Amino acid sequence: MTLWGGRFSEGPDDVLWNYTASRTDRRLLEVDIEGSIAHVQMLGSTGILTPTETETIADGLRAVLTEAQAGAFEFSDSDEDVHSAVERRLVELVGEVGGKLHTGRSRNDQVALDLRMYLLRAGDARVAELSSFVSMLADRAGRHAETVVPSYTHLQQAQAVSLGHHLLAYAWMAMRDIQRFADLRRRLNVSPLGASASGGSSLPVDPRVVARSLGMDGSFENSMDAVASRDLVAEYAWVCAQAMVHASRLAEELILWASQEFGWVSFSDGLTTGSSALPQKKNPDIAELARGRAAGTIGDLTALLALQKGLPLTYNRDLQEDKDHVFRADDTLSRTLEALTALVGSADFHPPAPSPWVTALDLAEVLVERGVPFRAAHEAVGRLVAALAAGGRALDEATVDDLAAAHGSFDAADLARIDPVDSIHRRATPGGGHPDEVHRQVEALRDRLASRE
């Protein structure tokens, strides 16, 4: 079934049909019906439809919605898209009066509404998944507040931190992803229905009634913008892509940590794979696929931006392609969060002690505490590092004489500053790596998650 055809002398050719008919939009079925119920009720409230017509069509749509919710709705190969499928089924149930459903609207404003409604609910689901992910990371971080590891800059060991502090960095990234979905929700929660094909309607439709009925914050300001714009779809894909980039960065570290060279973590047999040729292998495929699928999500975002860049106002059929990309980005994020939550949540972390060199800055700060300018302190510790390295010794092998040769302000007690465990316990600045700060961050995350419930 099509929602057009009166001016055509023949039906659509198979070539046209096979190329243009939409199947991707079938996941919009339930929101399409809900939007249609709100639309027909508005038509009744404004007198465009009689009370009997309104009740008949609304009851028919509720019956179609029941079928959809039960998974019993049957699409036909002759359905051009989800909108035509719903109207076809409605007419089957209530007769010709079902043809009045589309009064005062176009598929242009209809699909714009469907997308907003769908993405509102999908965004809420992603927030729930991200919240579970953050909660898991916070739990793991709390358990490893005292587990000392090196932080890295330029992939070189930098300062001593706790593993919990490291994991919490990803928890805060995910919290910002939650905030982005929440912020986007305000812009999505506006109804475009009533814009019609592009310029509104000569019938006395009231977009505000539809918006209130659907629990939306308001209706569109400009009918052309309402049907032509897909910036919110691209923004949704961007939030998904940014969250996937965060997931990919964590995945990269998990892959490194699971290697024999790092030896920081072991994953369960049930969440890893083996090699078809190498019996000893245990591969972190979840992490590798998360890293790889982030690339696809970035591609979906790029496609959505490119899709819009050359379109004149208002609706063009190019926009049918938006659903493939945003649905795929959304699905990828959802599956990735589920998989990474399971992988990290069940991981066995056992990192080796960091190199003693990670306390070099601590020694420089000793001198700063005694009034030495930081640049001079940095140079003095640099000389100490160079002398020890030239002699094949590590920083924890330094002697009092070594310290004295580097700078006269050092004393014997400063050798204790070379201990990485002691180092993290001295880092009490807000947001730093002290175990107490790790526990504070864990509680802060839990409070933020609780405030969203």
Image (cartoon, rainbow, N blue to C red):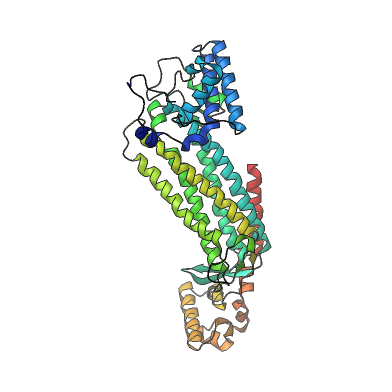
Q: Is residue 271 visible?
A: yes
Observer-nearest residue: 444 or 30? 30
Residue 237 image position (x, y, % from top left) = 46, 44
Q: Quadrant of the N terminus?
A: top left
Residue 272 image position (x, y, % from top left) = 59, 62
Q: Residue furthest right?
A: 143
Residue located 38% across and 43% down the image: 305
State whether residue 388 is above or below residue 128. Answer: below
Q: Quadrant of the C terminus?
A: top right
249 to the left or right of 412: left
Number of dots carrying numbers: 0
Observer-nearest residue: 222 or 205? 205
Observer-nearest residue: 142 or 336? 336
Residue 409 image position (x, y, % from top left) = 55, 81
State whether residue 311 is above or below residue 55. Answer: below
362 to the left or right of 199: right
Q: Is residue 439 visible?
A: no
Residue 97 image position (x, y, % from top left) = 51, 14
Quadrant in the picture for residue 267: bottom right
Quadrant in the picture for residue 339: bottom right
Residue located 43% across and 47% down the image: 300
